[in-house]
Amino acid sequence: MILLGVSEAVVVVLAFVLATVLWSGVIDADLILVYERGFLKILLVSGIFILCMYYFDLYDTFVLASRREVLTRFAQVLGTVSVIQAVLYYTYPPLRLGRGVFLVGIILGALLVIGGRQLFLVLNSWPRFAERVVIFGDGPLAQHLISEFQTRSELGIAVVGQVSQDRDLTHGSGATHRLEELSQLVESKRIDRIIVTMGDRRGKLPVELLLQLKARGVEIQDGLELYERVTGKAPLESLRLSWLLFSPGFYHLRPLLLYKRMFSLIFSAVGLLLSSPVMLLIALAVRLDSPGPVIFRQKRVGKDGKIFTLYKFRSMRNGADRKGDLRPVQEPDDRITRVGRGLRRSRLDELPQLYNILRGDMYFVGPRPFVPEQEEELAGQIPFYRQRWAVKPGATGWAQIHRGYCASVKDNAEKLAYDLFYIKNMALGLDLLILFQTIKILVLGRGAR
């Protein structure tokens, strides 16, 4: 996806440069690009073009596989880019690239990007370019990985066979393989990688055989590691205690924690200052819409299981959560007020959480905090659930941008898988990616109830 995005950015820039040459001629194009800062204007247009493609999910692997969906969203991108450029040209005329150049450039860019994507899909689905792998193991992790490889051709991985220590397995082509045949299979099928997915490896893993194959150039990879890289979440069904114990995550160095605290402190203070006029208007609207307090207070579970008070604008009728009525929000839900419905869809009801971040109850990025009763209930039903409390909760997080609203134990188990991945891999780059994705979700209004 990174390669596709960078290549398309280059293609769009070249399309507008070519449009300038075609529309103005070689001599005038040189003057426009160099002396009239035309190249900087082209970079601005191209940046907006690629950003719109990202916001319309054209770099999402699931959208990429559907040609109709790609063409529909691409048409939306062209319309959005045109509207944004029109607004920019109206508000700041020096940014104008010229109507003719812009029209020719956006047509050329669209044709080149669509053509390039078709070539990308053809090359990416060509079996010759796929990496040939053998799955060693037959547990849930093996089945999950095989399913990912079969449904996501962009990964470029072809499962040639599956081998078990205990018994023969039949894969998609109907062939069977014993452990004793592994070496011959690697040689005859030109295997590039063996993925070890066995849960219990004590006394069962043929270490010497795998070392011999590794010496012959075959990559030996842990299935848990690959599953994380492919899905962005921890494999709960196959999770071992050693994964938690020896993982580089779950132990966070002071510089990282200092960065998260300083980032949260500075930006929450700035956010409170800039949003205070909006918050005053929201407070007035909440008070006029329905009787009850403007701010909703609720106990939530924070780091190490400690309880803190979370602040939000009240979006439900006063007292709707009393008598243990903590059921998930439905569509529609008679507990939500008229103003509250708009606040929840826009996520503006969560603005008071900036105060929680400022005082240190939360970070901007981290696992989403829940009420104590719900947390204890889920901890009793989902293995490793208490590991979510290893870090401070956040206003947004890796699980929120991938999973959305959770209404069942299964949903929360899926969310835990993303939370554990985040806790293990917590870093500045991952936090920035989450914040960038969160802005996209807020702009498009996704996942709210």
Image: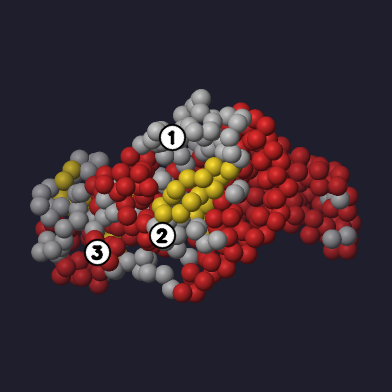
Q: Residue at x 61, y 48 (%)?
A: 351
Instruction: Name the amino acid, label 1.
Output: Arg
Count of marks, rendered view: 3
Earlier-in-chain disc, 2 versus 1: 2
Judging by the rendered image, the residue that carries numbered circle 3 is 242
Q: Residue at x 19, y 56 (%)?
A: 199
- Image quarter for residue 108? top right
Label 3 residue SS:
helix
Expressed as whole percent of the image width and height from the top left, the position of residue 4 reads: 56, 53
Left or right for 432, reference 288: left
Instruction: Name the amino acid, label 3.
Output: Ser
Above or below 208: residue 386? above
Above or below 315: residue 380? below
Numbered circle sitting on residue 303? 2
* C-alpha gap between disc 1 and disc 3: 42 Å
* C-alpha gap between disc 2 and disc 3: 22 Å
Earlier-in-chain disc, 2 versus 3: 3
Judging by the rendered image, the residue that carries numbered circle 1 is 322
Q: Residues within 10 Å of mark 1 (few under 14, many from 20)?
A: few
Earlier-in-chain disc, 1 versus 3: 3
Q: Residue at x 73, y 47 (%)?
A: 277
Expressed as whole percent of the image width and height from the top left, the position of residue 361 reads: 49, 58
Q: Residue at x 74, y 51 (%)?
A: 45
Pointer 2 with pointer 3, Cβ within 8 A: no
Label 1 residue SS:
loop
Expressed as whole percent of the image width and height from the top left, the position of residue 413 reads: 33, 45
- Judged by depth in the image, the label closer to the viewer, 1 or 3, is 1
- Judged by depth in the image, the label closer to the viewer, 2 or 3, is 2
Expressed as whole percent of the image width and height from the top left, the position of residue 251 reads: 37, 69
Instruction: Name the amino acid, label 2.
Output: Lys
Pointer 1 with pointer 3, Cβ within 8 A: no
Between 436 and 197, the one lying in front of the other is 436
